Image (tube, grey):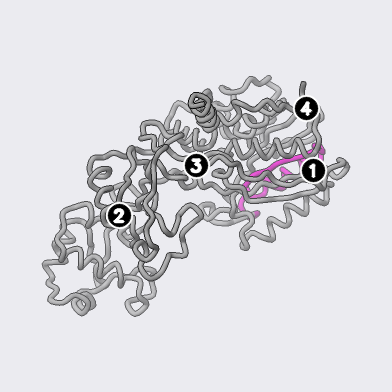
Amino acid sequence: MKSITKEVCYVKQLELFHPFKYTYEKFDFTFIDLFAGIGGFRIALEELGGKCLGYSEVDKEAIKVYESNFKNLPEASLGDIRKINKLPFEVDVVVGGVPCQPWSVAGKLKGFEDPRGKLWLDTIRVVEINKPKVFIFENVKGLIEPINRKSFEYIVNSFAIIGYSVKSQLLNSYDFGVPQNRERVFIVGIRNDLEHHKNFSFPEPLEIKPKLYSFIEGVQHCSKFSKSKLAAEILFGEKIPRSRNRFQKNDELNDFFIFCDTRDGHTTIHSWDIIRTSEREKLICYTILKNRRKKQYGAKDGNPLSFEVLAQLIPKLKQKELNKLIEKNILRYIENEGYEFVNSKNSTGINGVYRVFLPHSDIIPTLTATGNKDYIAKISIEGCENPEEYKSKFIKEIYKKKKFKPISAKDAGRLQGFPDWFIMAENEDTAKKQFGNAVPIPVVYHLMKTLLNQVKFDQKL
């Protein structure tokens, strides 16, 4: 009995690394891979039995990686989507991750005014000319935000006009077996002449609850980790922050630490926590932190505070005390305005570190092409009865001893569901950028399998 349980656990563990290893369902269909990137869609569809007839990509570095991983005939490259017209073959499925920058904050939300936004028009055109049975397209959450609502409705209505029943849904990578909090909108179209074109429903979340330590190399495995339960008022005081997400329990310590001087919280690490500072210096810093956003001191979301203001807030304040904090690179003085933190932008972190996630965490935030300052601790922390002990232990055992690591390209690949056989770009930064741009493979796999079953594609024997 013990060996059987052990074997089941082992199989589940392997499924996390190789999401398709124990799947035997194969279907008979062909597809083309638009905006192919490094092949995330293709891996998922080929695992389900699909045959790729062509791919479209213009990024030369992505094409190198794509072609090193997949066997392609020379004519399989369809080139720039803007030049694709009637294909010399019939195709069952069209998939692709249409460029997302026009609909994201990082891309300045230009939508169809961005040349990359107009690629949706080419996508619609290619579908209309070639009339595949089904299609799946992926994009950022921003595409369905209120600011882009009209553009999104235009896209959906355009597909409906050319003969497709269209549905969309926001899917999170975490719900399909990888520990990444990555929400993406998936648009599914089924040709109206197919018998089951109105029956499609999106896949339900899997029962697998992944943890970071199962995917990241070189960190402590915490399968027997237990979290302490603490009252919400101990963790947050009088008010629980509205910014908390589904992965943060109100009666548990956070699974991550944020390095930030301009905000506070039970796992926020400030610059005055990690270098030698007196209680008096800490008081000065906290006074600035608590007052910098008050409207009486200015209209900014964070205002420099003058010596006169600080002298009213801090009894017997001396100029030399502020000068000492400037010497320690915690404060800086802005001419005619006052004192502010050197680390005055939230996402820049401190000393190149923004967040450190413990290995027992459920998730890492969304991986991006531009990268971030997120790290993974090599060990976990448990047995703490209050936030002060938790923070102190983290600084002493993890931060000071440098027991944390950046997310490597291989880590990023696994967090996107790429199998270990995948040949990534030789340059580490290029590989991380490409994985950040990629589609999460397990999401596509389970979405496509659901679609193939519901639309009644033939299964291979």
SS at circle 2 = loop
According to the image, label 1 marks what residue?
190
Instruction: Return the disc, 1 or 4, that comes first in the chain's sequence.
Output: 1
Instruction: Return the disc, 3 or 2, that comes first in the chain's sequence.
Output: 3
According to the image, label 4 marks what residue?
459
According to the image, label 2 marks what residue?
385
SS at circle 1 = strand
Q: Is residue 424 something one can see in this rendering?
A: no
Which label lies toward us, 3 or 2?
2
Span colored in magenta: 112-139
Alpha carbon distance from label 3 to label 4: 31 Å
Q: Nearer the viewer, residue 140 or 398?
A: 398
Q: Residues within 10 Å of mark 2 (few under 14, many from 20)?
A: few
Q: Residues within 10 Å of mark 3 (few under 14, many from 20)?
A: many
For residue 179, the mark is 3
Which label lies toward us, 1 or 3?
3
